[in-house]
Image (cartoon, coloured by chain):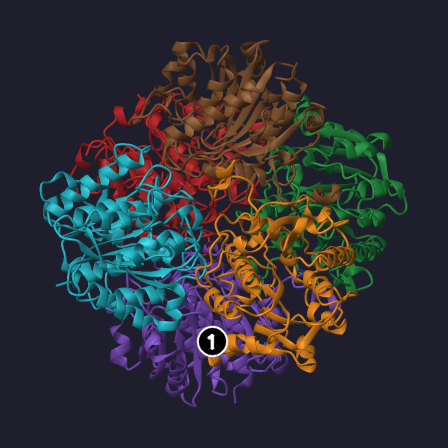
Chain colours: A brown, B cyan, C orange, D purple, E red, F green
Amino acid sequence: GENRRSLPFAGVSTLLGAPFRPEAPDLPDFGGLQVALVGVPTDLGVTNRSGSRFGPRAVRAVERVGPFNHALRVTPLAERRAADIGDVPFRGRFSLEDNIADIAGFYARLAAAGVVPLSVGGDHSITGPILGALGRDRPVGLVHIDAHCDTSGPQEGTRFHHGGPFRQAVLEGVLDPARTIQIGIRGSAEMLYEFSYVSGMTVIHAEDVDTMGIDAVAAKAREVVGDQPFYISFDVDGLDPAFCPGTGTPEVGGLTPREAQRILRALVGLRVIGGDVVEVAPQYDPTTVTAQVAAQMLFEMFSLVALAP
Amino acid sequence: GENRRSLPFAGVSTLLGAPFRPEAPDLPDFGGLQVALVGVPTDLGVTNRSGSRFGPRAVRAVERVGPFNHALRVTPLAERRAADIGDVPFRGRFSLEDNIADIAGFYARLAAAGVVPLSVGGDHSITGPILGALGRDRPVGLVHIDAHCDTSGPQEGTRFHHGGPFRQAVLEGVLDPARTIQIGIRGSAEMLYEFSYVSGMTVIHAEDVDTMGIDAVAAKAREVVGDQPFYISFDVDGLDPAFCPGTGTPEVGGLTPREAQRILRALVGLRVIGGDVVEVAPQYDPTTVTAQVAAQMLFEMFSLVALAP
Amino acid sequence: GENRRSLPFAGVSTLLGAPFRPEAPDLPDFGGLQVALVGVPTDLGVTNRSGSRFGPRAVRAVERVGPFNHALRVTPLAERRAADIGDVPFRGRFSLEDNIADIAGFYARLAAAGVVPLSVGGDHSITGPILGALGRDRPVGLVHIDAHCDTSGPQEGTRFHHGGPFRQAVLEGVLDPARTIQIGIRGSAEMLYEFSYVSGMTVIHAEDVDTMGIDAVAAKAREVVGDQPFYISFDVDGLDPAFCPGTGTPEVGGLTPREAQRILRALVGLRVIGGDVVEVAPQYDPTTVTAQVAAQMLFEMFSLVALAP
Amino acid sequence: GENRRSLPFAGVSTLLGAPFRPEAPDLPDFGGLQVALVGVPTDLGVTNRSGSRFGPRAVRAVERVGPFNHALRVTPLAERRAADIGDVPFRGRFSLEDNIADIAGFYARLAAAGVVPLSVGGDHSITGPILGALGRDRPVGLVHIDAHCDTSGPQEGTRFHHGGPFRQAVLEGVLDPARTIQIGIRGSAEMLYEFSYVSGMTVIHAEDVDTMGIDAVAAKAREVVGDQPFYISFDVDGLDPAFCPGTGTPEVGGLTPREAQRILRALVGLRVIGGDVVEVAPQYDPTTVTAQVAAQMLFEMFSLVALAP
Amino acid sequence: GENRRSLPFAGVSTLLGAPFRPEAPDLPDFGGLQVALVGVPTDLGVTNRSGSRFGPRAVRAVERVGPFNHALRVTPLAERRAADIGDVPFRGRFSLEDNIADIAGFYARLAAAGVVPLSVGGDHSITGPILGALGRDRPVGLVHIDAHCDTSGPQEGTRFHHGGPFRQAVLEGVLDPARTIQIGIRGSAEMLYEFSYVSGMTVIHAEDVDTMGIDAVAAKAREVVGDQPFYISFDVDGLDPAFCPGTGTPEVGGLTPREAQRILRALVGLRVIGGDVVEVAPQYDPTTVTAQVAAQMLFEMFSLVALAP
Amino acid sequence: GENRRSLPFAGVSTLLGAPFRPEAPDLPDFGGLQVALVGVPTDLGVTNRSGSRFGPRAVRAVERVGPFNHALRVTPLAERRAADIGDVPFRGRFSLEDNIADIAGFYARLAAAGVVPLSVGGDHSITGPILGALGRDRPVGLVHIDAHCDTSGPQEGTRFHHGGPFRQAVLEGVLDPARTIQIGIRGSAEMLYEFSYVSGMTVIHAEDVDTMGIDAVAAKAREVVGDQPFYISFDVDGLDPAFCPGTGTPEVGGLTPREAQRILRALVGLRVIGGDVVEVAPQYDPTTVTAQVAAQMLFEMFSLVALAP
């Protein structure tokens, strides 16, 4: 069976072509994995277009990403014991709060086992409970690429919607706002993001990229997170809709994939402890370009993990 | 301004091209309307593909349906004071239970005002509270076109999901199972529909249409609902996916639109008191055929209302 | 992990939601399986549009088919030890002849182990070597739904293209033409199909369905295959392009899915020994209706296998 | 160069794969052609969705139709000297009236040369001037498949829009209403079609097909046109939108391609003198099924021409 | 009803989410509006792909743009009395000249009432009569983003086609070429644009953006229009087709949305008196990215209007 | 007939709108042509998504490219006797080796006749035999835009797959590695490209474009090929998938069309002797942007040819 998966169009596809280990979550230490690729298929937190519940499946269907990252010169699957361990098991489809709780429980176990999680959403509400698990012992830093700061308050009866996970994380003490940078911000919800400024996050708007230059932005990201543990959260709507049409709240005027790659690659050698790619809604992605970008960014994160100290 | 809306591609589009009266819900008697065309944009009850929250918008965007129904020889907008009164106002986007309660309240007011509601979902969970409002005084009959009986029990902590509204309606005493016919049933969830049989509903499977002939099915529908008030609920997945790809739980082997029209038109002269078309998910409908069928079926229902005794 | 796969949009999807057993082919008796669901991702035999190499992946991605067949009243996964065993391993992507040889070898092992194969192509060239394996000991019967007879001779230097597998099978003595029925035939290549008539196959053109009625066609199929072992080969282009746009050689004027289901279901209780669904090209299937139909027909075949004597 | 066009995906595609003779219109007798396949790329007469100016190009792009018609047992290209002679040359893109005049002039020359025209629109306005040319000497009969009668009067300042060509043709004395049958009629514009009834046309609504049966409809068509010369005009919106989404004024509840083929094939042996397929708008046809149906129906017409007395 | 429109997927959508005031055109002063958002649904002036008659509807369907412009720090709907007043009423669908006259009349009334128009086309022919109305008293300046100069002469019998409005406007004395800048020019029609150079317009080709840098281009635009009244016309084909596939005459190698935003935002504080976004053809825009960009650019213009002296 | 082709949506479309001369290959000197536009419809060499066999047809269908190149100020069709001579005739569809041999033979004749070939693939395997023909007398230089170096060795039994043509060309002595530059390289197959480095090619990765600047890259290209004859091979996957979704092995993070144009245009005045655009797979290109870019790049090459010494 060695050769069975060698054709990109053949077989059952997994995240980044990693081995499929759906039984790992049932083992005490996740079977000794160092890195877990995880799907988190829920979109109950969206405020506009639903659909990202199919995000993990769409990213799995990407035929060719990796194994070698020529820019960072690393083959992450060769450097870490990693697997696609399937999706977070949810007790149901109808309650945002229950989904959040299920994610929290699952990642608490991953964190306890010391497994680095690389996740595919799902909407951005999933990052709240993930940070809750990873930052339990000490608040983490964050590189956050997105069109939106996602630091708004409770809305329509819940604090778990996809527009607020980073506020929640700060309030819970699991995210350090001073070590948080948000890049690509734009659109019309600026008034909802006061918390970012008040709490001390560094906010880089999309138009700042034009004035600063992308390498200065990348350098700023390195500076903000420093040499302490940090997380990467990549909302595909940080990119321009031409590159990522398949998402729930697109915003014109975003980053290019090359700019995003420059930022991520600049983080090499720093202490990344996990990451996610969220808000892939394949119903709006007839060419699959969004899923491709998401898979590529996940691969860049995995490369950083493989090279982290 | 008389001619302003005469081009089908111009202007702001409404359900069936009816006048737009968004202020009507704020008037005590809905401004004297006899028929209200209503959008119910929620998809929190779906079990598979989300997206029908955009159903009302998709059906509004259909350019040409009506005004004349040549088969029934009626121009319903000329026979009834009717308007598109906009969408049910929801208090939020994140709670299925809250959405159900909001629908219940809205339709209670419509029922109290004696306005006949013709609704566009949203997923099938919306029909539960609508029947609750219309059947408050006496249980109603039902012609139900669908691939699924939607009579399953509570699931994952809620009884309001889109697979159970008709069970709920019977249990609440607002739907008369003896005067309920379900047509087009197929797929793999038969074991969930025991309630339909136990409660005494008439179930016509898709393959029964082949053996009975569509006109016998239509005659059966007339017989079941009889001369008492009844409701029509049209889930577009009752049709074959070729005619209705844009839906959340498609099932191969369904009705054709012509068969569905024969059933609906056979109900002319009976006491229809409302109806809905549900489960239009335009993200899966690149040709807009699903929205077109949904609009046409809504128009057939409106024609029946205009000709009801 | 019991509940992990309960959401149709979650997890790694397999053919008909069967357990995934990619290691089975490496076990002597395929791990004791009675039925193997197999992908055969090759399209080197097509004469027009390529793309069906992605057919197995597309059918796997269908979210909901089965587990219960209400028309035949069977839950095939509960009746047979069955699994998705992945795809036929190919030595390469560039040689039609090599692909054919690899299929032949793989199915010879399945046949030797007594495992009933249910396959998803790939183009129709795959059926030749499958029949070669299943008919080795005695020629089998065939119910063949297709727009084309696929009994033409060698073309452009090969006899393995997708227009000729049934001629080959007869010439190799593995297919009994007297017990072969081809249903749905139409299009412009009639002159290539003389072999069907000469060898004694029963050919039912698409327009014959109108004159005979579908139930007479189904009865004819039962009669032709009789009570001896037979195979089912379902080319999705047997259906009309409205139902199956995602295929390589579409032909206007085909069967409906309901007609196809009537034919297949009429075969209940007969000795089906395997089957395939071929020519799904998802690049031409933006609504996924083709993949859905293919999955449903595969499920109907599986149901027949579960009920075969 | 004999083999150059043998691959369906290769080369420059023409209508029905006929030889390309763009110079023919410049020759006195169209180079001795008996049948001319002609594109008429204009959509200035549409009332809703524009786009059928690309209809000829879309039908040319269909890879495989013909050469053999197995149902009628004829290879029309072998029976008649025929060619794709390109498109009607228009003096411009901005004037409906000029387009109509250019078509009139072009077909007058074809008629004078005794060449049978088989045309691809463009919108239905093109049929008016074509009938004007073919019926100059004596009014012709007509088999008209369409959702709309297209017999309405002048609208918004012109009598040449796509909703009125058959009224015009009767008023000009080139079409015999008593020998005209319109099949598939439905939708909401019945009040515009009084002229059909008043002038004595036979109108078969879509729902009549269900009550009469398709073979009775076909027999009626034979009876209406009789043994005198007649024309066939096929608006793809006569079919249900599932089969023909790519059109400008779709109407739910139409014919199936198999029904349309039965009608056309029943006309074999009668004196067809030309035909057209109109209203193909490929912008709304992501699967190309509409173009495929259009090409097939054009091929059926060509077969009838080859077998006409 | 205050909250009724708070969900982006609910209700009847309007341009930029502005109040819908279809009755305003019937009031003497347009009901006291300062800014009118207007649809102009005509595509009779196109030279290639038709379809932009659906442009206004597509831009209205965009779910989320505004209300706050964080880069310019303004909420235009709060600064100006503005409404979506529906579409220009056309007397018909078949005459380009009549459409032009209807636009001219409508905008003359807007101009007389001192209402600033922000329009959505339709093809670029609409800008001619708009400039005619706005420039009646003194020629206006122009910032024109486009792939084409649109200064060619009469063609095929009309001077109103979409390739010539700016030539017309200069010849009519309503546009000041010395205060006109055209940005993003490319493609193959350069020989048609001599008038731009002869009349003294400033032409910035797409490749000039690379050599000058976008900020220099923006500065040049400020300089050209100066402190006198000017208009903004944004043809979406000024952007690269990846960002704007849904348009009638796409040209490879265009601007990015970020570049366009930089140009527009640089005009803040200058005397903009109106603007339009044209050539959105949603039939070619399966991901809706074109409509999104168009809505965003309209919003940028509205922001400039709100901040104009 | 002079005006017959003046409407971009009319008539039979050819590569760059050039005259169609399918008989030219049958003439001894190709009818005196200086430049031949040729389709090469084969995709048997692909390793992932098939479909580029339809590439030539897709590029022909592009409505508007040329005739004038304003940046280079040339009308190439006016400067050179050029025609679309149709597609390379293949003896069959099933053998990669045969296709390669057919291409080799065809281009040998073109080379012998001194006709400059500009080709549209097909997959990148076609460039091997083209270089074989053009470089027979002396090895040529190469400007190669691509995501992949395509210098890998034999795979799965063949050396003719689309990942290796440039290795083959060097080994055959028809390509001079010292005068070869590969631009846009990225993705995960770097380990397969050792031959590029070993043989002395200049490799510019996608991220090098960010650090060098595009004009330095262009200057490097000029320097590498120098003043001797060179070929241009443009794989559309050199561009980012947002600009070119319709291709078989997309790679995130590629060039923009403007960058590619800058590189190509910088080659003006150098001795280009042919070129190709490959890997257009229209099945993955619902907006046709990929075909448009391909046509534009072909036009840029033709412009260079027209201006070559």
Q: Is residue D117 left or right of residue D17?
A: left
Q: Position of residue C247 (x, y in %)?
A: 58, 59
Q: Is residue F163 left or right of residue F265?
A: right
Residue D303 visible in the displayed image:
yes
Q: Position of residue C123 (x, y in %)?
A: 65, 59
Residue D149 visible in the displayed image:
no
Q: Position of residue D281 (x, y in %)?
A: 46, 59
Query: Looking at the rendering, which quadrant does residue A300 occupy?
Result: top right
Of residues D30 and D245, the one nearer the viewer is D245
Of residues C122 and C65, the one nearer the viewer is C65
Of residues E131 and C211, the one nearer the viewer is C211
Residue at the (74%, 56%) spot, across then down: C109
Above or below, comparing residue C240 to residue B173 in the picture? below
Query: Looking at the rendering, which quadrant does residue B202 occupy?
Result: bottom left
Query: SS of the residue at dot 1?
Result: helix
Q: Is residue B231 left or right of residue F285?
A: left
How crowded is the residue under tag 1: few (<14 C-alpha within 10 Å), some, or many (20+)? some
Q: Quadrant of the C terminus of chain F?
A: top right
Q: Position of residue C93 (x, y in %)?
A: 74, 50
Above or below, comparing residue D159 to residue C49 in the picture? below
- Which chain letter matches label 1? C
**Count the marks: how many?**
1
Of residues E8 and D96, the one nearer the viewer is E8
For badge 1, the amino acid type reads: Asp
Q: Which residue is mark 1?
A: C215
Q: Quadrant of the N terminus of chain F?
A: bottom right
Above or below, comparing residue F75 to residue B301 in the picture? above
